[in-house]
């Protein structure tokens, strides 16, 4: 086996490295900077140039080496390279080749381009280790054009009614995607500190984002009426939002496709914006890799495995600590 | 259907009452009258019956979507709603001309009479013609499960705004056994004939629970206390030589409780009583407990044996109409005095009896009286302001229920099952057990009482600590103790534990309590002895 599944994470015995390990290891190859993939405490990290700044921002002083997309590294005779996953800026699938056999670890991915993340590319392989967060046929995303029209309409209506529009979106990825999706000419974009800190990191590495205003205790909110407030979902439920006065709230998440979840979140609106592949995206990705062996890591693994098996694949489930089926992801980066 | 789907979306995507009222008012102002009438019917629980069975619909949807049946079912398990699952898996619709809500409902109702191949063809064609929310609403209508987060009160208020008719008057007009087939918008709303429906009940006056100290309600002499019975709220109507019995949920229960046919022997025509239906032991002149009444609920026809084993009466506590005159505006003390005049001296075999007042001198003496409610076969006290009219629906201030604190027991969670709908991806339905020596005996299920945050926490734990799966049910290690509250306990031969609880729910998560200190089966049996 090129890769095996250990208590610490996905392991390459020939190269003696781990991919996205959740326990402390010597050498970690990391697909992207989200907390359930980039854990702290490893001795040595390897990630893409584009993912590195955010990882340093989140994990502090770490021993981190970075590589370009497509650049091949030899680690103890194992050829390793990173390929765009389209999930968030800097996110990668990791290709591992040993003695002519190729395995790919998907990390989290989205097959449709979002104008922000490096667009997903299929990587041919023998074995594909894939997420399936939204691995059910009920998940079928709208196009970004349809989504931005929905969000713009909501923002415009609120602005006309003298309200702010507050949208809950994970600080890395979803928040930036929302602000690049909307028509920034509608009004000012106001950001929570956690979002703006990530913005600063991304801007420094050359990512183009619309103008934003960091909200602090000194910000004169009266000077920015009818703004789009972009904040982590948790901030929408807390006292932070009170300073804005009348406000309409929304959550941007793939889970908003389900009416029950949408209603439970008690936001005024739920926009189905996901950084993960939908059912069609997952199936397309699996097909395009040309792989015969598929390992489903996190999400609706049992369903997706059975489906793939019926499609003629050798499909298995691997227990990992990425996501937690629905809950953490619902709170975080889905 | 576009206009109605638009209304549905507006109502569904907000939690704010003001926004809902605005959306409904606008709809009642501009939708066609026939659609208005159907909307009123739908929002007051008068849904068309399911015309296609759920299995067929699932099969057809899976077929159209190109999915194996197991995958459709797995999706349904997650979504928790059949209409939504079908809507989500189907391919996008093609553009089709818009048809009104009432047109669609007429077709849906006609469906019941058609043979299956025609039915299927029609449903499949409809799926290709309806887009987005329209298709979801359509699925809700054919599955007979249409619901939206709007109370009848909110709907009535919006209709009042749109029509200029007073809200309480409208609430009354909307009561009773009408359907859009039997009436019209004009006959029901704008120009009703008061004689048209003699069975029409008055809207029930509802009470809030006492918060804090009842002494805050003001001078005790302004109040009347009554026992709060543990039965079924009912309104008994004697008009036009006939009798009608309505439940609080606006269900006509006349046939289910034939005892009340004799009410006309004891009471004049033009009488309407509000009270509690109780299974009644004529010998001891005491209620028989809810388990006896339960044998009468949900049965359309009642056997002689059931009738003899659990006869019912109405314990009346209010007089809403006397000699055909609506008394609701009178002060409660006055209505009560008239009620006493009408029924206090009825013979013991009358199906109606007076619900007595509970005398009390001041608030301090009422507290200890409330503590004895279980001995009186009641679940607490009702407090009613002497000067209050009979309100429409729930109004704060004049009627209060002051229930006993629930019985409680600390139990260990042993199984968990995912919820549905709003709680589709959370583990919310739990089975609890108590100790019998060193064994845990399951004795109840409970699925409410925790906060969403607590449900998320326990769900996280369930996912990581599953011992075994039995279909949707997961067995978990006995590690968590919950305080279970319930209103009553009865002997049960159906349950292994030998008991059945009434209204069990989780009062709190006893994080502080080790599993070994949870209650025992012997504790349950002792409660059964004491309160059963």
Image (tube, rainbow, N blue to C red):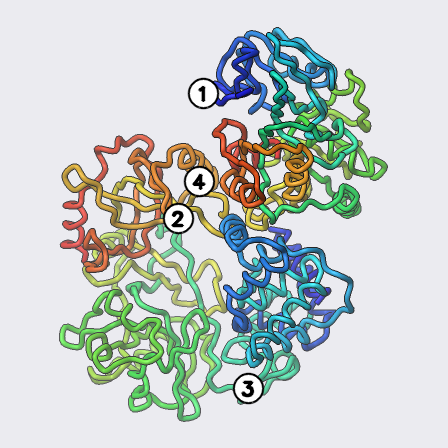
What is the secondary structure assignment of the residue under circle 3? loop
* Mark 1 touches mark 4? (CB < 8 Å): no
Q: Nearer the viewer, mark 3 or mark 1?
A: 1
Q: Which residue is mark 4?
A: B455
- Dot 3 or dot 2: first in sequence order is 3
- Which secondary structure, mark 4? helix
Q: Earlier in the sequence, mark 4 or mark 2?
A: 4
3 or 2: mark nearer the eye: 2
Residue B169 tag number: none
From this view, report whether residue B150 is shown above or below residue B172. Answer: above
Q: Residues within 10 Å of mark 4 (few under 14, many from 20)?
A: some
Instruction: Give residue B499's position: percent from left, percent from top.
Output: 21, 55
Give the chain letter at badge 3.
Answer: B
Using the rendered image, report if marks 4 and 2 lie on a common chain: yes
Q: Nearer the viewer, residue B177 or A252?
A: A252
Work out whether mark 4 precedes mark 3 in sequence or the reverse, and give the earlier one: 3
Quarter holding residue A32? top right
Q: Which labelled disc corresponds to residue A7?
A: 1
Residue A299 versus residue B210 in the image, above or below:
above
Identify the residue at image location x=38%, y=53%. Answer: B210
Comparing B340 with B307, the one in front is B307
Q: A282 left or right of A179? A: left
Nearer the observer: mark 4 or 3; the answer is 4
Q: CA distance from mark 1 to mark 4?
A: 28 Å
């Amino acid at each position: 086996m090129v890769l095996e599944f250990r208590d610490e994470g996905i392991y390459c015995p020939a190269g003696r490295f781990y991919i996205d390990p959740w326990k402390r290891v010597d050498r970690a190859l990391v697909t992207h900077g989200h907390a359930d993939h980039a854990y702290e405490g490893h001795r040595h990290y390897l990630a893409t140039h584009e993912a590195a700044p955010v990882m340093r921002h989140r994990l502090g002083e770490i021993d981190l080496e970075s590589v370009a997309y497509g650049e091949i590294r030899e680690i103890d005779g194992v050829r390793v390279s990173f390929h765009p996953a389209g999930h968030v800026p800097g996110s990668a699938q990791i290709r591992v080749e040993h003695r002519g056999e190729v395995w790919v670890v998907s990390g989290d991915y989205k097959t449709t381009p979002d104008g922000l993340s490096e667009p997903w590319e299929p990587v041919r392989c023998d074995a594909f280790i894939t997420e399936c967060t939204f691995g059910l046929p009920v998940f079928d995303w709208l196009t970004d054009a349809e989504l931005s029209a929905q969000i713009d309409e909501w923002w415009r209506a609120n602005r006309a009614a003298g309200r702010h529009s507050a949208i809950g979106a994970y600080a890395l990825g979803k928040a930036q995607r929302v602000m690049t999706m909307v028509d920034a000419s509608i009004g000012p974009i106001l950001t929570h500190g956690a979002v703006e800190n990530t913005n600063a990191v991304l801007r420094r590495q050359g990512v183009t984002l619309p103008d934003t205003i960091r909200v602090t205790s000194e910000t004169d909110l009266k000077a920015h009426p009818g703004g789009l407030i972009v904040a982590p979902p948790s901030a929408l439920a807390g006292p932070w939002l009170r300073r804005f006065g009348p406000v309409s709230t929304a959550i941007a998440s793939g889970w908003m496709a389900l009416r029950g979840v949408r209603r439970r979140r008690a936001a005024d609106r739920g926009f189905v914006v996901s950084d993960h592949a939908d059912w069609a995206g997952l199936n397309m990705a699996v097909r395009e890799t040309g792989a015969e062996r598929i390992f489903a890591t996190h999400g609706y693994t049992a369903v997706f495995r059975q489906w793939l098996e019926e499609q003629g694949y050798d499909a298995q489930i691997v227990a990992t600590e990425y996501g937690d089926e629905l809950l953490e992801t619902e709170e975080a980066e889905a | 259907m576009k206009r109605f789907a638009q209304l549905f979306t507006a109502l569904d995507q907000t939690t704010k009452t003001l926004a809902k009222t605005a959306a409904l008012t606008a709809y009642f102002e501009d939708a066609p009258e026939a659609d208005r009438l159907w909307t009123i019917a739908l929002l007051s629980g008068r849904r068309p019956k399911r015309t296609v069975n759920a299995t067929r619909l699932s099969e057809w949807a899976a077929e159209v979507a190109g999915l194996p049946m197991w995958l459709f079912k797995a999706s349904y398990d997650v979504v928790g709603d059949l209409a939504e699952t079908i809507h989500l898996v189907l391919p996008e619709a093609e553009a089709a001309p818009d048809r009104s809500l009432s047109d669609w409902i007429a077709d849906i109702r006609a469906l019941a009479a058609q043979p299956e191949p025609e039915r299927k063809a029609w449903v499949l064609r409809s799926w290709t013609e309806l887009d987005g929310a329209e298709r979801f609403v359509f699925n809700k209508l054919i599955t007979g499960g249409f619901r939206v987060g709007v109370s009848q009160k909110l709907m009535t208020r919006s209709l009042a705004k749109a029509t200029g008719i007073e809200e309480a008057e409208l609430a009354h007009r909307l009561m009773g056994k009408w359907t859009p087939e039997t009436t019209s918008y004009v006959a029901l709303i704008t120009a009703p004939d008061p004689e048209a429906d003699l069975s029409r009940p008055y809207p029930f006056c509802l009470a809030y629970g006492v918060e804090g100290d009842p002494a805050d309600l003001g001078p005790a002499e302004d109040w009347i206390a009554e026992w709060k019975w543990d039965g079924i709220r009912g309104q008994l109507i004697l008009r036009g030589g006939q009798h009608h019995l309505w439940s609080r949920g606006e269900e006509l229960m006349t046939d289910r409780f034939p005892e009340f046919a004799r009410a006309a022997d004891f009471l004049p025509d033009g009488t309407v009583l509000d009270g509690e239906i109780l299974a009644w032991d004529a010998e001891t002149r005491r209620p028989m407990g809810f388990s006896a009444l339960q044998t009468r609920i949900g049965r359309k026809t009642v056997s002689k044996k059931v009738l003899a084993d659990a006869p019912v009466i109405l314990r009346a506590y209010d007089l809403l109409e006397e000699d055909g005159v609506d008394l609701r505006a009178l002060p409660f003390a006055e209505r009560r005095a008239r009620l006493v005049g009408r029924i206090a001296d009825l013979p013991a075999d009358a199906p109606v009896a007076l619900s007595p007042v509970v005398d009390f001198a001041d608030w301090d003496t009422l507290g200890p009286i409330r503590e004895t409610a279980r001995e009186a076969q009641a679940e607490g006290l009702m407090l009613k302001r002497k000067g209050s009219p009979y309100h429409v629906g729930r109004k704060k201030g004049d009627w209060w229920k002051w229930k006993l604190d629930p019985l409680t027991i600390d139990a260990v969670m042993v199984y968990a099952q995912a919820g549905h709908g709003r709680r589709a991806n959370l583990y919310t339905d739990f089975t609890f057990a108590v100790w019998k020596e060193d064994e845990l005996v399951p004795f109840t299920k409970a699925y409410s009482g925790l906060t969403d945050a607590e449900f998320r926490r326990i769900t996280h734990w369930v996912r990581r600590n599953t011992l075994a799966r039995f279909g949707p049910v997961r067995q978990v290690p006995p590690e968590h103790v919950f305080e279970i509250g319930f209103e009553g306990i009865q002997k049960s031969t159906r349950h292994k534990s030998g008991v059945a609880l009434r209204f069990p729910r989780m009062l709190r998560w006893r994080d502080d309590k080790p599993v070994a200190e949870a209650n025992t089966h012997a504790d349950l049996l002792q409660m059964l002895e004491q309160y059963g």
